[in-house]
């Protein structure tokens, strides 16, 4: 056991640090930030994606044969940690790199790999995910959006929802019903759909934060060539499950933790500046307890992630601590935002447009935004069922 | 970066676990009452456990805190009665602070199990670092005056490691032999009798001073809190396993109660808390073993997380048992009792959170 970097890991870390320093705009994170407008931000993130590719940092865990670096899980974690530490922008194509890519490497045909993987790596084609529907949330296998074979095409009709960044996407991977008569898991297929096809309507959903990251997407007889079926017909459920497995895990949690720590540092500074009865909140014994609890939880998130990462690095199966990664951090982060609201006191509700908002309204925004975390990618209730059944062996 | 134990450490754990599964646990606790179990002690000594942290030069095994960590967890899982863990924790102090002469005098007997050691730290104050017991030079040696409480297994120990304040107000550690003049031991009554908690009074009791001063007192508290955290991880693991077995076989409304989401969700939350505390406790073991500057904060994080976790897991484990959980005949209560003692020993969750807060928020302290 040793929680410190090895000399090789240290060298890798400083290589990334130097690259980031040379490639992020001057004054990044201090005087220069991401554009405020959503469209400008998307364009900015896509540019950043391309810069990462040019620097050799796009898809670093991808095998060399697919244009990646074949980086180890620990190198990947170091890379993502340093990105987070520098407040580097999220790329625009996280879904493409983290979900489409690995799914196609596992289940795609040689032609699909050749067609789709290189543009993902180069930041040229952005992807979105078409799984959930209005009637199929936690019960994902009940999806009804259908694909009917017609000559050399599938004809897709139906609706998807919660589709992040559909408006900026070139492609969508989808779970569609291809056999309405089969049992629900057995009649599903996995399709790759060109978002420029005729018959697609994208309607933004205004979130409680006022932003429009999510969309409803309507498909009206959209034609998809049979060549864009991944795996076998009616075997889509198994493929979708692999995709979801790529969504959760220690490599994703560790950089997220670093970003949370950056926010927590901001919260500590706020606690030292906000006055309560003429004294800083940081001297209030009750608030000290809560801030310390939040710190311990943040550290726990990091340490759980390092345990999982160690297993990956040793080539072992992920352990129990990786089964609840998202369940843990989603609730932890919600508690963090509640504490931040308390530190702000009555003024905690003020938002960014108000000059008196604590921390420029950052935490009132995060309080709202964090409501999504215990819902997306499987609600906490579904996560708890999975942990109880798959890890602890409780009966269904 | 490597955050796991090595295969030797797991092998050692497995061999100790086989012994504990056979010789310790609820059955031993029921059979032995609160009295010292000489046969169990003999078995633990034959495994060489008291010698684990003692250097080979003093007839020990020469291993470190990281090697002990998994064992302390399993000793919690097996409800191991005092004073093995106390003896091992004390040996960490003696190895660092005893003079050559003292080491030769004490360590071989400690390693063989001929001597049994415990600590006297707590006084009649909620703050575990509160120190009023006095140590004064007297002739060639020193004398101790005052009262300690919550001393584990004092009645079966041969030596006590005592924290006390010298005439200059400085804290330090001292060694008293049980049976020395002016030393009185009386058992407490508690909800965890098997920890053998005792009151100990000192009236001009002769003592030998150890080097290390305040730092040695603090390290003793930190190592004790680490051992408590690891034991709580073990205690909670065992309580949760009992509840899991019960939930899988107990049937109501025509199905095992473990099939109900109300029960499943409790278990999921218990597991999340348990594994988080385990991560923190292992990290603290590494930090203390590595003498990393972050060690005191790492220990406080572990003790706070483990104390909160152990409360949750033991209480829920009992609740999941329903009515039989409230009977003496089922074993879950033994774990709740031990967990409750450990939860509050060496600083409870809020005491340790305040240590974390001071580190985070008070500029005067080193980060």
Image (cartoon, grey):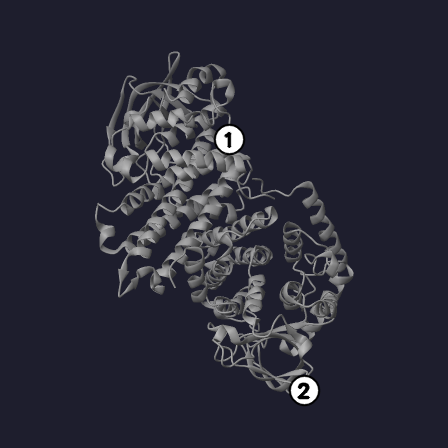
- Residue B78 visible to an observer of this rendering: yes
Tell me the mark number nearer the camera, choosing from 1 and 2.
Answer: 2
Query: Which secondary structure, mark 2?
Result: loop
- Residue in the picture at 75% in, 55% down: A19
Does the residue at mark 1 contact the one at mark 2 (Cβ under 8 Å)?
A: no
Parent chain of label 1: B
Q: Are marks 1 and 2 on the same chain?
A: no
Query: Around disc 2, counting alpha carbons within 10 Å, would you say few (fewer than 14), some (14 to 19), or many (20 or more)?
Result: few
Q: Is residue A83 above or below residue B332?
A: below
Image location of residue A311, percent across then percent down: 56, 48
Check disc 1 and report the residue beneath it. B64
Parent chain of label 2: A
Image location of residue B274, percent across then percent down: 42, 50
Image location of residue A120, percent across then percent down: 71, 67
Quadrant (top left, top right, bottom left, bottom right) of the N terminus of chain B? top right
Query: Which secondary structure, mark 1?
Result: loop
Quadrant (top left, top right, bottom left, bottom right) of the C terminus of chain B? top right
Check disc 2 and report the residue beneath it. A198
Query: Around disc 1, counting alpha carbons within 10 Å, would you say few (fewer than 14), some (14 to 19), or many (20 or more)?
Result: some
Left or right: A238, with B16 as reference point: right
- Residue in the picture at 25% in, 32% down: B32
């Amino acid at each position: 056991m040793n929680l410190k970097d090895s000399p090789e890991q240290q060298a890798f870390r400083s290589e990334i640090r130097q690259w980031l320093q040379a490639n992020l705009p001057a004054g990044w994170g201090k005087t220069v930030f991401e554009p405020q407008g959503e469209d400008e931000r998307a364009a900015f993130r896509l540019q950043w994606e391309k810069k990462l590719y040019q620097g050799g940092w796009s898809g670093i865990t991808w095998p060399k044969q697919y244009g990646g670096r074949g980086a180890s899980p620990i190198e990947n974690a170091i890379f993502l940690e340093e990105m987070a530490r520098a407040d580097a922008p999220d790329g625009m194509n996280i879904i493409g790199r983290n979900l489409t890519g690995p799914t196609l490497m596992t289940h795609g045909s040689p032609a699909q790999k050749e067609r789709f993987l290189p543009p993902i790596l180069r930041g040229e084609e952005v992807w979105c995910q078409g799984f959930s529907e209005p009637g199929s949330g936690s019960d994902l296998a009940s999806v009804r959006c259908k694909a009917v074979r017609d000559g050399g095409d599938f004809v897709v009709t139906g609706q998807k929802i919660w589709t992040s960044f559909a408006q900026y996407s070139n492609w969508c991977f989808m779970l569609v019903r291809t056999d309405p008569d089969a049992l629900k898991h057995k009649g599903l297929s996995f399709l790759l759909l060109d978002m420029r096809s005729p018959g697609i309507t994208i309607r933004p959903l205004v979130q409680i934060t006022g932003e429009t990251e999510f969309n409803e997407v309507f498909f009206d007889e959209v034609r998809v060539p049979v060549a864009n079926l991944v795996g076998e017909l009616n075997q889509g459920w198994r493929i979708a499950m692999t995709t979801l497995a790529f969504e959760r895990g220690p490599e994703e949690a560790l950089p997220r933790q670093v970003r949370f720590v950056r926010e927590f540092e901001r919260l500590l500074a706020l606690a030292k500046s906000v006055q309560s009865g003429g004294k800083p909140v940081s001297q209030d014994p009750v608030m000290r307890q809560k801030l310390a609890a939040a710190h311990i939880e943040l550290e726990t998130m990091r340490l759980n992630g390092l345990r999982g990462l160690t297993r990956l690095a040793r080539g072992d199966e992920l352990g129990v601590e990786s089964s609840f990664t998202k369940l843990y951090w989603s609730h932890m982060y919600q508690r963090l935002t509640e504490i931040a609201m308390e530190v702000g006191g009555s003024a905690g509700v003020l938002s960014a447009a108000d000059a008196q908002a604590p921390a420029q309204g950052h935490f009132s925004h995060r309080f709202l935004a964090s409501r999504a975390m215990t819902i997306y990618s499987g609600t906490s209730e579904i996560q708890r069922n999975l942990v109880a059944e798959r890890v602890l062996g409780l009966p269904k | 970066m490597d955050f796991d134990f090595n295969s030797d450490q797991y092998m050692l754990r497995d061999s100790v676990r086989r012994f504990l599964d056979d010789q310790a646990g609820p059955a031993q606790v029921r059979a032995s009452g609160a009295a010292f179990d000489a046969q169990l002690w003999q078995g633990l000594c034959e495994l060489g456990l008291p010698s684990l942290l003692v250097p080979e030069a003093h007839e020990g095994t020469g291993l470190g805190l990281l090697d002990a960590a998994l064992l302390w967890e399993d000793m919690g899982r097996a409800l191991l009665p005092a004073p093995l863990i106390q003896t091992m924790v004390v040996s960490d102090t003696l190895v660092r602070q005893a003079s050559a002469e003292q080491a030769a005098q004490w360590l071989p007997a400690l390693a063989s199990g001929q001597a049994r050691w415990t600590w006297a730290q707590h006084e009649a104050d909620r703050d575990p670092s509160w120190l009023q017991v006095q140590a004064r030079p007297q002739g060639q040696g020193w004398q101790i005056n005052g009262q300690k409480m919550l001393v584990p297994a004092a009645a079966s120990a041969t030596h006590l490691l005592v924290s006390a304040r010298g005439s200059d107000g400085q804290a330090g550690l001292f060694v008293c032999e049980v049976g020395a003049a002016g030393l009185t031991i009386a058992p407490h009554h508690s909800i965890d009798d098997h920890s053998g908690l005792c009151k100990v009074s000192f009236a001009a009791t002769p003592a030998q001073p150890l080097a290390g001063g305040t730092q040695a007192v603090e390290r003793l508290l930190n190592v004790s809190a680490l051992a408590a955290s690891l034991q709580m991880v073990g205690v909670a693991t065992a309580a949760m396993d009992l509840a899991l077995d019960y939930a899988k076989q107990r049937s109501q409304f025509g199905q095992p109660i473990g099939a109900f989401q109300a029960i499943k969700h409790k278990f999921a939350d218990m597991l999340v808390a348990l594994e988080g505390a385990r991560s923190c406790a292992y990290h603290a073991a590494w930090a203390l073993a590595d003498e990393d500057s972050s060690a005191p904060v790492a220990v406080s994080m572990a003790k706070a997380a483990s104390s909160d976790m152990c409360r949750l897991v033991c209480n829920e484990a009992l609740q999941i048992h329903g009515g039989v959980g409230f009977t003496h005949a089922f074993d879950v209560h033994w774990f709740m009792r031990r967990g409750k003692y450990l939860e509050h020993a060496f600083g409870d969750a809020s005491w340790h959170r305040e240590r974390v807060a001071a580190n985070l928020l008070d500029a005067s302290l080193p980060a």
